[in-house]
Amino acid sequence: MSQEWNIKSRGHVCSVCYKNLVDRAPVVSVLKEIPSGYERLDCHPECWKAFERDWEPFSQWDSVYFAPVKEAKKEPVKKEDAGELLRQLVSLDDPAMKNVVYVLAVMLERAKILVERDSKTLEDSTIRRVYEDRKQGDTFIILDPRLRLDNLAEVQQQVVALLSGTKTLGDVVADEEAFASADEAQPQAD
């Protein structure tokens, strides 16, 4: 699959019976692999159990549905927070940003904003991690770039620079491309 990551928003109606999901009620969330990527299904548990299908989910988890809350309109914020930055980077779908995207996802997981719901090792040995935003219910499918410990500090500096506003996305993309070129030139130890 060509996509390295993407976001799937939580549904507000059951994908099987099409009735509204109920605030604070159990829900089964499922990712289905389709030719163009992934499709997310959110279902009442009883509907999912009764749902006949001839396919296996890419990922499946039980959670609780939280109805969206309308927030008062805020003044635009100049600096992006980590969640907004992750959404922006994922929507860019730029493979050069895979390390930054992954570190942001792990950072948000540690902050208990994202929860890892699943991970899959694909035939090409890549690992896709499935994260869910605890509050908004969006699902992120993130490529695990298998960062080496000696590369982590540089990627963390890039994330800090983006969050603080001292670097732009263009600066970080250029850094990542230079970093990837240098990494490919180094002999790999077995």
Image (cartoon, rainbow, N blue to C red):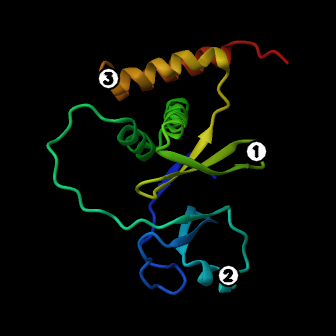
Q: Disc 2 marks which amino acid?
A: Lys
Q: Given the current orientation, which residue lies at the most extreme front position?
A: 24
Residues under numbered marks 3 and 2 in contact, where contact means CB atoms less than 8 Å apart: no
Tell me the tag on residue 164. Answer: 3
Q: Quadrant of the C terminus?
A: top right
Alpha-carbon span between mark 2 and mark 1: 32 Å
Q: Position of residue 140 (x, y in %)?
A: 52, 50
Residue highlighted by disc 2: 49
Q: Residue at left 63%, top 46%?
A: 129
Q: Quadrant of residue 158?
A: top left
Q: Disc 1 marks which amino acid?
A: Asp
Looking at marks 2 and 1 on the same chain, the residue that comes earlier in the sequence is marked by 2
Alpha-carbon span between mark 3 and mark 2: 47 Å
Looking at marks 3 and 2 on the same chain, the residue that comes earlier in the sequence is marked by 2
Q: Position of residue 125 (x, y in %)?
A: 76, 42
Q: Residues within 10 Å of mark 3 (few under 14, many from 20)?
A: few
Q: Position of residue 21 (x, y in %)?
A: 44, 77
Side of 176 where 32 appears, left or right: right
Q: Position of residue 127 (x, y in %)?
A: 69, 43
Residue highlighted by disc 1: 124
SS at circle 2? helix
Q: Residue at left 50%, top 33%?
A: 107
